[in-house]
Image (spheres, grey):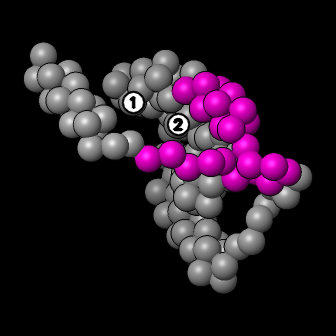
Amino acid sequence: MNYIGKWTKFEIAYLVGFSIIIGIVSLTFFDPIKPDWFNYLNIVSAVSGILCVILVAKKNILNFPIGIINVITYGYIAYVYHWNGSMILNWFIFFPFQFIGWYYWKNNLNNEYTEVKVKFINVNQFFIIGAALIIGITF
């Protein structure tokens, strides 16, 4: 199976460039109270988040294991800083959905490649989802 796929020069430059920026910013703003490994965890979390989004955009199944790393690390960072909403969202919503998405993605693969068959919602489904979101946010 071809898990890497074809990467454009722009995608490689984007990933490398933003990883360097994240590294510089993270190293500049190290939390002096936290141990060094925790400060490096910020870099791992940020880079894995960017990589996960790029892999999703490329329709690559490897976004799920990278996403698992991201939600675990960012959830832990949120836990340490008492960002309870982000912790709950990452650990109890995004983490289980990584496995659910991985399962459904794996079962909808096209032939021997790792790209998934893309399905679009119709207009009725769009309005139903929109109404559900508005009701959910309101109440």
Q: Classify residue 32 as left or right of residue 130.
A: right
Asked whether residue 106 is drawn in magenta, I would say: yes
Q: CA distance from mark 1 to mark 2?
A: 8 Å
> Is disc 2 placed on a helix, strand or loop?
helix
Magenta extent: 97-120
Does the CB distance between marks 1 and 2 fall below 8 Å?
yes
Q: Classify residue 76 as left or right of residue 37.
A: left
Could you say where residue 120 lies in the image, as x and y percent from the top left? 44, 47
Q: Residue furthest right?
A: 1
Density class for disc 2 (Cα within 10 Å; few <14, some 14-19, many ≥20) is many
Q: Which residue is mark 1?
A: 86
**Is residue 39 placed above or below 90 in the rendered structure?**
below
Q: Which mark is residue 74?
A: 2
Residue appearing at x 50%, y 29% in the figure: 94
- For residue 6, what is the image quadrant? bottom right
Residue appearing at x 66%, y 48% in the figure: 116
